[in-house]
Amino acid sequence: MAAAIALSGRGRGLSTPNPNVGCLIIRDGHVVGRGWTQKGGRPHAEAQALDQAMDRAAGATAYVTLEPCFHLSPRGPRCADLMARAGVARVVIALRDPDPRTDGQGASWLRERGVTVEMGLMADEAARAMGGFVLRQTLGRPHVTLKLGLSLDGRIALPDGSSRWITGPDARAHAHMERARHDAILVGGGTLRADAPSLDVRLAGLEARSPRRIVLTRGDAPAGWERIGAPQDIATLDRVDHLLVEGGAAAAAAFLRADLVDRLLLYRAPIVIGDGLAGIGDIGLTDLAHAHGRWRMTDTRALGADRLEVYEAVRSA
């Protein structure tokens, strides 16, 4: 299942509005098929894996990160039906599909046709990998990652606004990889006016995965950009399940103040700036007690001389 979840990451930022699912088919201890949701949502991961496995799928075990779809679509067959017809003997599912068009029906369909179905293996990890789809289905909005490149003392620029470069090349390359994993990227109107950022992906082979550009502003958006007037408006963005917020301090504060940040990426450079520009503006905090217990670290790693820290928001179920 861990391998299937890793495969699902290949479709993130490409498969929307469909979930980025991963699937692995095992027979006699060997991988005979693997797949992940392709660009635009088709083919589904299961269909791709079954096409690769061909007749070796009969009697095999399929590991899939999301319950195989059950709803009829003009774009392709139901994955639950495909698996049953292929003769898969056992299907291990990480996460039950929150989409009401499936939501348990795919698993039931398989069981009625003699397929052994197990549900719940590594469900939390699968939900994290498909965070945008899950939040869109449950809360009606995309998953939001806030990215900050900071000095040790929490600054993003010198007092005059100079910010090139806070972090080194390895951290910047990682940030570009993160861009490629998102459907859209957002900055505030002040950052757009001051820096005119291109927000593209500048990694060899991934240039075509540059996300849509969105500006948070009360004014108009320039050509090639989309506009929202408030953080809550992200719910109206079509085909955006994973949103990356890159700056500046006012935009970061606005999303934090609205409790719309699900994941923090903090790139810390081993430098001290002193009297510079803060990375985050006022978030409305009036009591330090309310700041504790809000974030859980999920990863930390060295990126050249810099360090990346990844945090997830702690929320009640």
Image: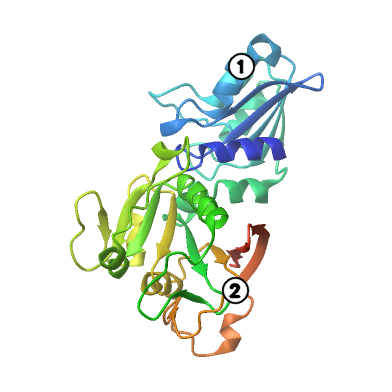
Q: Is residue 16 above or below residue 297?
A: above
How would you rate the neighbour count of disc 2 (Cα within 10 Å): few for under 14, some for 14-19, many for 20 or more? few
Mark 1 to mark 2 CA distance (whole Å)? 44 Å
Tell me the kind of residue under disc 1: Gln
On the rendered structure, is 307 left or right of 241?
right
Q: Nearer the viewer, residue 68 or 288?
A: 288
Viewport quadrant of the C terminus: bottom right
Q: Are marks 1 and 2 in contact (CB under 8 Å)?
A: no
Rendering coords of residue 109 (x, y %): 60, 27
Q: Residue at x 54, y 52 (%)?
A: 174
Tell me if 82 is positioned left or right of 256 in this view.
right
Q: Place residue 297 in its image quadrant.
A: bottom right
- Tell me if mark 1 has few (under 14), some (14-19) or many (20+) residues whose alpha carbon lies within 10 angstroms of its own: some
For mark 2, give the secondary structure: loop
Q: Note whether 201 is above or below 208 in the view shown.
A: below
N-terminal of the pair, mark 1 or mark 2, is 1
What residue is pinned by disc 1?
52
Question: In the drawing, does residue 15 fall left or right of residue 268?
Answer: left
Determine the residue positioned at 55% across, 25% down.
79
Question: According to the image, label 2 marks what residue?
Answer: 294
Give left or right: position of 310 versus 278.
right
